[in-house]
Each structure stands twice: as structure tokens, then as C-alpha cells.
Amino acid sequence: MSEFRNSFAERVANLNWVAGFFDGEGCIYYHPDRVKATVNGTEYRSPEIQVIVGQSGEDGKLLMEAFQQVYGFGKITMGHGSELTKKIPYMCRLSGKKAITFLEYIEPYLVLKQEKAQMVIAKGLEHFYGE
């Protein structure tokens, strides 16, 4: 097994665990006809696909770093902290083909989000690869 930078990365490499975590804390975003650009009054549209995962607190930051390391998630962003807990939420996301690849990894293990993942994978493969 490869060397991990933090203790969370080994757990995040376990697809059963990550699918369960994503079922509870992740988000699959799909917009079938998003305006990507407007040039000289002409709108250019295509589907938008994103997966977002987040967790609050310092452990949440380490967990998001593990998602970056293991699955290539992008920049970690911080949300607004809770007045009650004082914990800052951390989030990271994947878009496009990378989002589809991540969903393909975890889809067999998902419970709550499996049906949506299957739909988004199918739409993404059709759009990006013509399948």
C-alpha cells in the first residue's frame, strides 16, 4: 500500500468507507444545460457535473486533504463557521470528467446517492465520451 501523508488518507482509500461518508456528507450536482460562456451574444451551453464533499473542524481539514491526496479533489475552501460549535467547515470538489471517475469508483458502494450517481455517470459518459 502506498505511503499516506496523513492518517485519514488510508481510510479515504477504502471505497466502502468513502462511499458511506459521501452518502452522508457529499453532494452530487448536475445541471443538464448550464451556460458556460457568452461570446458576442451567443450562449455556449453544456452539462455541469460536480461532486462536493465537506467536513468541519481541524479533523475535517485533514480529511479534505486526504480526499485531495487520494482522489485528486481540488482546492479546499472554507465556509462560514457555526456560532454554536465555532467549527469552520472545509469543502473540496471535483468537476467534469474527474467527478465522473470518482463517482464510478464509489457508485457500487453507495446507498443513498447510488441512483443519482448512476444517472450522472450515464449523462457524463454520454457528454464527455459519446458513450
Image (cartoon, helix red, strand yellow):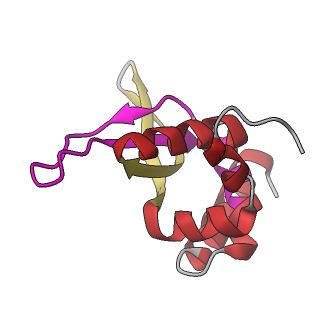
Check residue 93 for magenta coloring: yes
Q: Quadrant of residue 37?
A: top left
Question: Residue 72 location, x and y as percent?
Answer: 67, 36
Q: Residue at x 72, y 46 (%)?
A: 128
Q: Residue at x 25, y 45 (%)?
A: 87
Residue 26 visible in image: yes
Residue most extreme to the left: 83
Question: Residue 75 location, x and y as percent?
Answer: 50, 28
Check residue 99 for magenta coloring: yes
Report the side of 69 relative to 28 (left or right).
Answer: right
Q: Residue at x 48, y 40 (%)?
A: 92
Question: Residue 108 location, x and y as percent?
Answer: 75, 74
Query: What span is in magenta?
Result: 74-103
Residue 43 against residue 41 in the figure, above or below? below
Q: Residue at x 52, y 70 (%)?
A: 23
Which quadrant, please, contains the C terminus?
A: bottom right
Front residue of this view, candidates 49 and 40: 49
Residue 93 visible in image: no
Front residue of this view, candidates 33 and 6: 6
Q: How many marks?
A: 0
